[in-house]
Amino acid sequence: MKVSGIDYGLGSPWEIEVPDSAMVIEGPNPDRIPRALENPAQAVRDAIRKPMGMKPLAELVTASSKVTIAMNDWMGVGVHAVPVVLDELREAGVEERNIRIVIAGGLHPKVTRSELILSKVGRDLNPPYPSPFHILSPEIVDRFWPTGWASSRIRPHDAADQDHMVDLGVNEMGDLVEVNDCLVESDLVIYMSGWSGVPAIWGGYLGGGQGITVGLGSARSIMTHHAYRIHEHKDSMASEARKQLFMFNLANRIIFCGPKSAEAASIVGGDGCPDLGRRVASGMPDCRQQ
């Protein structure tokens, strides 16, 4: 069975071939997709002034606070959010010299100065400014990284740099917790994700806590949970129990095939799409054999 009209990447639209027994789940009606924010910066400002479950940003700092802004390295909201956060911190009395930006890239290659303005992932797309691939605005880069490396208050995380790691011990699951020293030297750490809500094969979801533990973890710390015992855990999307699942998540379509399809669909659908699991039949052939 051929599925056409898949809008994904530079080669769009794609046509792919899947087993006849596969179930194609179409995306939501375009009318249900929220419109783009007319003023993203104001939306960020409103959110941090009236956050859910915590105090406003201005109440979390004092004039003497040292603040770290940690960010995803490939894409995110930083181009809109960082200027707003800096304004809020300044209004709260925090001196800009006590603010640093750390690019939480985990074991990814360290970003260059130019990649802060347009990420490596965005280079091929060359989207109009501003976009999720513009990590920081040129004005912020010039302020925090004005000339050479020595003047920079923007530091790409280096997972191999033990001089800037802090060993916090081993957690109850046996994972080494060794992280960038900015997490213990700062009075406040603000993490800006680029992937929140996307299921991770290692369990849980990308963004949030994973942005800290992985994005700012040491190499040996990351390898304790990016490991075979985690990969093959029953809750992992890549485990033996579910590895016969073959899934494409392409723009507005999800295509399931394999005997674990119904189980995987219910996991991917979750509470946000409770009908998804019921719409995918089990007992489908393993598409790798087709």
Image (cartoon, grey):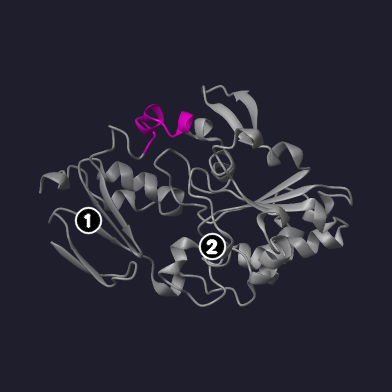
Q: Is residue 131 above or below residue 167?
A: below
Q: Pointer 2: what residue?
A: 115
Q: Residue at x 25, y 43 (%)?
A: 245
Q: Earlier along the polypeptide chain: callout 1 or callout 2?
A: 1
Tell which of 115 and 3 is nearer to you.
Answer: 115
Residue 151: percent from left, percent from top: 72, 56
Residue 97 appears left or right of 147: right
Residue 93: percent from left, percent from top: 88, 57
Residue 207: percent from left, percent from top: 54, 49
Identify which amino acid the numbered label 1 is placed on.
Met
CA gap, disc 1 and disc 2? 40 Å
Quadrant for the N terminus in the image: bottom left
Q: Pointer 1: what residue?
A: 23
Residue 112 appears left or right of 273: right
Q: Residue at x 76, y 62 (%)?
A: 86
Q: Residue at x 59, y 73 (%)?
A: 37
Q: Secondary structure at mark 1?
A: strand
Crowding at dot 1, Cα within 10 Å, few <14 / some 14-19 / many 20+, comes out as some
Identify which amino acid the numbered label 2 is placed on.
Glu
Tell which of 152 and 80 is nearer to you.
Answer: 152
Crowding at dot 2, Cα within 10 Å, few <14 / some 14-19 / many 20+, comes out as some
Q: Does the magenta portion include 107?
A: no
Give, as a single range, the part of the protein colored magenta. Answer: 223-236
Residue 170 appears left or right of 243: right
Residue 96: percent from left, percent from top: 81, 58
Q: Secondary structure at mark 2?
A: helix
Q: Residue at x 33, y 67 (%)?
A: 8
